[in-house]
Amino acid sequence: MDWSGALKTLGSAEEIEIETRRAADAPVHHTTVWPVVEEEEVYVRSLRGDSGRWYQDISANPDVVVHLDDEEIPVRAFLAPDAQSVERASDGLRSQYTDSPHLDSMLRDEILHTTVRLEPR
């Protein structure tokens, strides 16, 4: 799947699985996250803030694999705590998950800095 196709699919996906590892030779860890596509950029955020396992993994090793519709998409994770990225991700979460009882948990001030942008490798 090319990146433009992935963006379309990610934009309509409620959840995706990301595969992380702390180092290239470390065991793989899988986590389900909410993707948001805003202005052709893909964002995810750690519900558990800094203590989220996947967030700790990408901080050490930003090479991640997104599992989507039986496809594996290699991406690089970039920490995106800047105001513009946080706002885009939050706006996308509000728009895409408006009916979820968990939405407020993803918009807590103490986790906003764990916004991450995913880009193709």
Image (tube, rainbow, N blue to C red):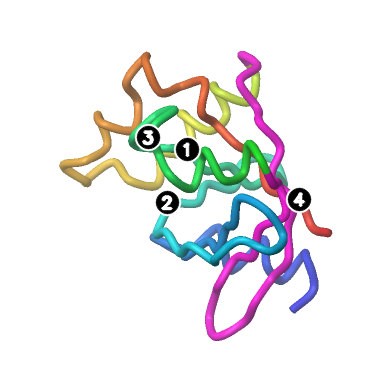
Q: Earlier in the sequence, mark 3 or mark 1?
A: 1
Cα distance between the residues tagged 3 and 1: 13 Å
Local crowd at mark 3 within 10 Å, few (<14), some, or many (≥20)? some
**For the C terminus, which image quadrant?**
bottom right
Identity of the amino acid at label 4? Glu
Q: Tell me, yes or no, whether the two marked residues, 1 and 4, touch with CB atoms within 8 Å.
A: no
Cα distance between the residues tagged 2 and 4: 16 Å
* Numbered tag placed on residue 119 in the rendering: 4
**For the N terminus, which image quadrant?**
bottom right
Cα distance between the residues tagged 4 and 3: 22 Å
Residue 76 percent location from the top left of the image: 74, 51
Q: Earlier in the sequence, mark 4 or mark 3?
A: 3
* Numbered tag placed on residue 16 in the rendering: none
Q: Residue at x 73, y 66 (%)?
A: 74
Q: Is residue 12 above or below residue 37?
A: below
Q: Which residue is mark 3?
A: 94
Cα distance between the residues tagged 1 and 4: 15 Å
Outermost bottom residue: 70
- Span colored in magenta: 61-83
Tell me the SS state at disc 4: strand
* Numbered tag placed on residue 34 in the rendering: 2
Front-lying residue, 5 or 75: 75
Cα distance between the residues tagged 2 and 1: 8 Å
Local crowd at mark 4 within 10 Å, few (<14), some, or many (≥20)? some
Tell me the SS state at disc 1: strand
Q: Residue at x 27, y 37 (%)?
A: 103
Tell me the SS state at disc 3: helix
Q: Earlier in the sequence, mark 1 or mark 4?
A: 1
Q: Tell me, yes or no, whether the two marked residues, 2 and 4, touch with CB atoms within 8 Å.
A: no
Instruction: Specify whether 120 is left or right of 18.
Output: right
Q: Which residue is mark 1?
A: 45
Front-lying residue, 17 or 87: 17
